Image (spheres, grey):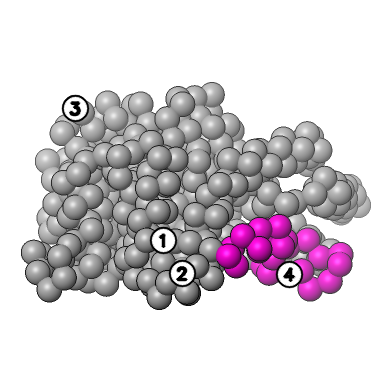
Amino acid sequence: MSGRPGSECEIPFVDLITQYDAIGGQVAEAVAEVMKSGDFIEGHAVNAFEMAFSQFVGTSTAVGVSSGYDALELALAALGIGAGDEVVLPANSFIASAFAVMAVGAVPVLVDCREDTYGIDPAAVDAAITENSRAIMPVHLTGQPAEMDPLLAIARRYGLRIVEDVAQAHGARYRGRVCGSIGDVGCFSFYPGKNLGAYGDGGAVTTSSPEIANLIRQRKNFGQTIKSHHLQFGRNARLDSLQAAVLSVKLKYLDQWNAARKRNAEIYRHRLAGSGDLRFQKTADNGDHVYHLFVVETEFRNALQVYLQERSIRTGIHYPTPIHLQPACADLAYRRGDFPVTEALSQRMLSLPMFPELTVDQIERIADAIQSFFVDIKKSSVNS
């Protein structure tokens, strides 16, 4: 992630400052209202954002929390998932998905992803179900919805819960339904670089179950909904009013920003078609991709990243070491080779600059640099 580019010619991976320049006045007014009110915790700004966000997603309730990780952990706990239970989730995801399962005492059961869409493979999920399975956690990776229909069918067959990890897919739709409204709960991160990002950490859980929402509200606030009356074990995982005020301003622009991301992705695909061995993530017919990330694949990933860096073009790699090969997950007893698709993608995937304010001229420059890289690669192979 980047703030203001270091020079006029630098293309950042994410440019949050240009976005702020466009909405800074509205943000300042919203923040000033909170400051003048002195209402900083669980106040009007949080209630207003929760109402607006639940309406946007299409659930009866949204509960603001302190981070996307907390959203996942609180949701799992509210569903009664704990020691001895298993939650099936993709190996191709950020490690927070697995850590949240471990935090409630349950076991993350990892499965491989689809080679074309990068999403969790429903067939692998079905094969991983045991008598201890309690939930499936589809991750709407890079901004593209997971294949929810077959996952919902599996959940119905075995009596499982669906916990949607929507940290990268704010506003994405699957068969017309907004991600976060399809399963039992939707868990969102508002980390600054997300499609809908705060100016600090933040998150939310969406659900249409009043019981689940109430349990999360209690647990995120020391187990209380009435001050000093603690009904269950809880902790401090509240969304603060200043971040809620910022998010309310930015939510009004989310559809517009997502449309710009989709436009940028189409330009990328057109300009980079036929470039070396470059491959693109397949877009599913039944999903609306909102391009939190624009990912390309190449066997020359590392060299390409260095080549672009030398030309002041910033890129990202997600995720070079998969969850099952992380030292922190050694107790899960997975080994290299267990998830071949995920492992192959971890060595091939490169995320190009993607943000709503990315210009056509910037994309042209990025595409020209990538094409020049593959021309050089071809020349090197001919001369060797």
- Start-end of magenta stretch: 2-29
In primary-sequence order, the first of circles 1 and 2 is 2
Which type of secondary structure does the marked residue at label 2 adopt?
helix
Q: Determine which residue is flagged by label 2.
A: 34
Residue at image coords 17%, 55%: 215
Left or right of residue 234: residue 238: right
Mark number, residue 45: 1
In primary-sequence order, the first of circles 3 and 2 is 2
Q: CA distance from mark 4 to mark 3?
A: 50 Å
Residue at image coords 78%, 34%: 270
Please state which amino acid type lies under the numbered disc 4: Arg
* Crowd class of label 2 (few under 14; some 14 to 19; many from 20; radius 10 Å): some
Q: Determine which residue is flagged by label 4.
A: 4
In contact (CB < 8 Å): disc 4 and disc 3: no
In contact (CB < 8 Å): disc 1 and disc 2: yes
Q: Determine which residue is flagged by label 3.
A: 157
Where residue 333 appears, as percent x and y from the top left, is 28, 60
* Crowd class of label 1 (few under 14; some 14 to 19; many from 20; radius 10 Å): many
Q: Nearer the viewer, mark 3 or mark 1?
A: 1
Q: CA distance from mark 3 to mark 2?
A: 48 Å
The quadrant of the rendering that contains the C terminus is bottom right
In primary-sequence order, the first of circles 2 and 4 is 4
Please state which amino acid type lies under the numbered disc 3: Arg
Residue at image coords 72%, 42%: 264
Q: CA distance from mark 1 to mark 2?
A: 7 Å
Left or right of residue 86: residue 140: right
Which type of secondary structure does the marked residue at label 3 adopt?
helix
Mark number, residue 317: none
